Image (spheres, helix red, strand yellow):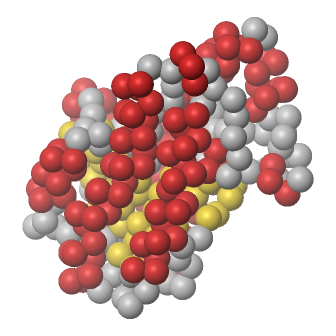
Amino acid sequence: MNNLHILVTGGASGIGLGIAETLGKQGARITISDISQEALDAGVSKLKEQGIDAKGVAADMSDVAAIDAMAASLASDPVNVVVNNAGLQYVSKLEDFPADRWKLLIDVMLVGPAMLTRALLPSMREQGYGRVINIGSIHSLVASPYKSAYVAAKHGLIGFAKTVALETGDTDITINTICPSYVKTPLVEKQIAAQAKENGISEEDVINKIMLEPMPKKQFIDISEIAETVAFLASPAAKNITGQTLVLDGGWVAR
């Protein structure tokens, strides 16, 4: 990771911060972005406490102008690797799903990654090296009820990555999508409560009968597993892995 400048969106907490910590400890220069300046400051402080070269840039991933401004602010130290991780969830039957929330999920988790990648590709081409790593989900491959916007956005990432892989085949730029099943993060904790309400069952039943039931290994994915997969994809060793979907699902889709 030495000499690589890595940008992680949604990097102030959860999976994003875990990725930033892992890659920073391996010698990368880290920039994290988040919509919350308070969360961003706390995340940067945590990284610096571990001796990581880190900085933060506040950005709203649903705002194309903000995305372009963030990319421009990093032009003096070009980004080599971008991890499109920012995300959010809303659980509801489609007929009760607020239209503005549906659009927001698509904007943050599909339009945002596309526009950030668009903004960073020219400098990656100039450097002759670039890695775009999307954090997808098991819901990039399968569906669950009450998550129509999330599932649509995460499915879209795979098609987006395949297309950009074809467009960047002439240089050492790759784009891939990592698809973990459930990771125990604050976002998933909120989902457990929301799913329990929508399905009329206990939170324990949500975990065992909805989240872990399809997984032969019956366990949540560790953030470290995702982070180490990112580290490999960011490396020169992965130069011919592009347009791919890497599934960390405990055997879910093997059924």
x 13%, y 51%: residue: 69
x 21%, y 75%: residue: 123
- Image quadrant containing the N terminus: bottom left
The residue nearer to you, when weighing 32 against 109, is 109
Relative height, residue 239 to residue 145 (above, below) = below
Q: Where is residue 105 in the image (x, y as percent from the top left)?
A: 43, 35
x 70%, y 34%: residue: 144
Q: Position of residue 119 (x, y in %)?
A: 23, 63
Asked whether residue 51 is in view, the answer is: no
Side of 205 where 133 appears, left or right? left
Side of 5 where 136 appears, left or right? right
Q: Quadrant of residue 148?
A: top right
Relative height, residue 134 to residue 196 (above, below) = below
The residue nearer to you, when weighing 149 against 182, is 149
Q: In which quarter of the image is residue 73?
A: bottom left
Q: Where is residue 57 in the image (x, y as percent from the top left)?
A: 20, 45
Q: How many labels does the image show?
A: 0
Q: Position of residue 110 (x, y in %)?
A: 42, 49
Asked whether residue 143 is in view, the answer is: yes
Side of 238 where 197 appears, left or right? right
x 83%, y 43%: residue: 215
- Seen from this angle, which residue lies furthest bottom? 170
